[in-house]
Amino acid sequence: MSETSENIQSGSDTYQCMNCGAALKYKPGTDFLHCDYCGADTPINAKTVDIVQELDFEQYADNFEQLNTKTTKIISCRKCGAESTFSESVKSTTCPYCTTPLIESDAHEERLIQPSYLLPFKIAGKDTSKHLDTWLKRLWFAPNKLKRQALQTNQLQGVYIPCWTYDAQTETDYSGQKGVHYTTTVGSGKNRRTVTRTNWYYCDGHVSIFFDDVMVPASGMISRDIMNKISNWDTMNMVEADNRFLSGFITEKYVMNMNNGYELAKQKINAEIEYAIRRDIGGDDQRITAKNTQISDIKFKLILLPVYMSSYVYKNKLYHFFLNARTGRVTGDRPYSPAKIALAIIAGVAALILFIMLLNSQ
Ligand SMILES: [Zn+2]
Ligand SMILES: [Zn+2]
């Protein structure tokens, strides 16, 4: 702990206000812990990150014990099974995924790898509505009632989502064929026409790519698809993981381990390499007949990303919003209004009939 943090009691992950003893919470967008009772702010003095330290994958992949692990109290949701941790500053809370109350006595302890870096919450909970509002306004065919109801929801929860990142140097030898299009005239008489054909030329080559921070979300609850949709993270602003930033928020336990995460990262890496090979071959069309990739210098780290989520029930079905708490980007699943869709179809058919009538009148 730094000398400036004498106002904070650490040890357990609860930080108390020296003014009044209340549990402190991280104040989004600032470098302070805030007391909701007396209003006092306590500086965190987070360590800024000059050089991001990555861990060697080969060295740790089979030696989990060597990593920075810590016994952590995990609370599982009785209904959906989501596993998370939260500090005492979140007195009682509900599962961010299914809104079932989380019960302290359901907690168990587990040894978990500690995140190295995190992006602190930047957008305050009260400021999320304008981002949600913008998103809702752009939704096509959403029931009007939903728009009102969704904004009234007070189930908003701030959750840190665990995410693995991987770096790797790749060297790939490939062989393939370059396709070059040409046009020629075929047939005779009435059947005479121009067609496009391809000449294929054998080629081989080498592509060398360094991958930096290939992200693989390790959440068991938010799909990777959802995380991709809100993935405009400003990772250059990461700070060293400090539990004070977690105070007042829920932190989801990583469910995917670092090895499975690496397998997914490799899929992303291979897709990029294939794209690079096609660019390298050039021409109008490409065939890759063989490729051999050497991956070296694989590094990894565990980070936490701040997401607000809210769930609401509309006509007995549960829907979720997800909001990137750094950039305000929103995504979510949503119902469609059958009435609005029907109206759109009717309008479309009417336009088509009008169009045909205009054509015929000429
Ligand atoms: Zn206080
Ligand atoms: Zn749940």
Image: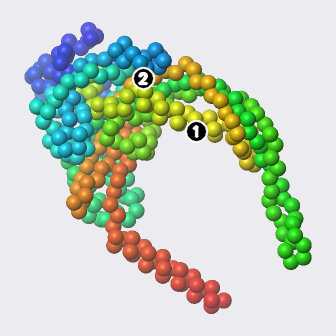
Residue pushed farthest right? 188
The residue beneath circle 2 is 301
Could you tell whether 14 is left or right of 297 in the image?
left
The picture quadrant where one finds residue 10 is: top left
Q: Quadrant of residue 161?
A: top left
Q: Quadrant of residue 247?
A: top left
Where is residue 348 shown, x and y percent of the image? 48, 76
Compared across the picture, whether 100 is left or right of 167 comes to left
Q: CA distance from mark 2 to mark 1?
A: 22 Å
- Near-viewer residue (168 or 42): 168
Image quarter of the C terminus: bottom right
Q: Is residue 60 left or right of residue 311?
A: right
Residue 185 point in image, percent of width and height: 87, 65
Residue 346 shows in the view: yes
Does mark 2's beta carbon lie closer than 8 Å to ligand 2?
A: no
Provide residue 41's location: percent of width, then percent of height.
Answer: 21, 24
Q: Which residue is nearer to you in this view: 292 or 128?
A: 292
Residue denoted by label 1: 271
Query: Which residue lies at the image location 14% right of the left edge and 21% below the top edge?
Result: 17
Residue furthest out toward the bottom: 361
- Name the element at disc 2: strand
Q: Residue shown at 35%/64% (left/top)?
A: 336
Could you classify mark 1 by the number of other residues whose Cα lies within 10 Å: few (under 14), some (14-19), or many (20 or more)? few
Q: Position of residue 27 (x, y in %)?
A: 26, 30
Q: Amino acid at mark 2?
A: Lys
Mark positioned earlier in the residue sequence (2 or 1): 1
Q: Residue at x 52, y 25 (%)?
A: 167
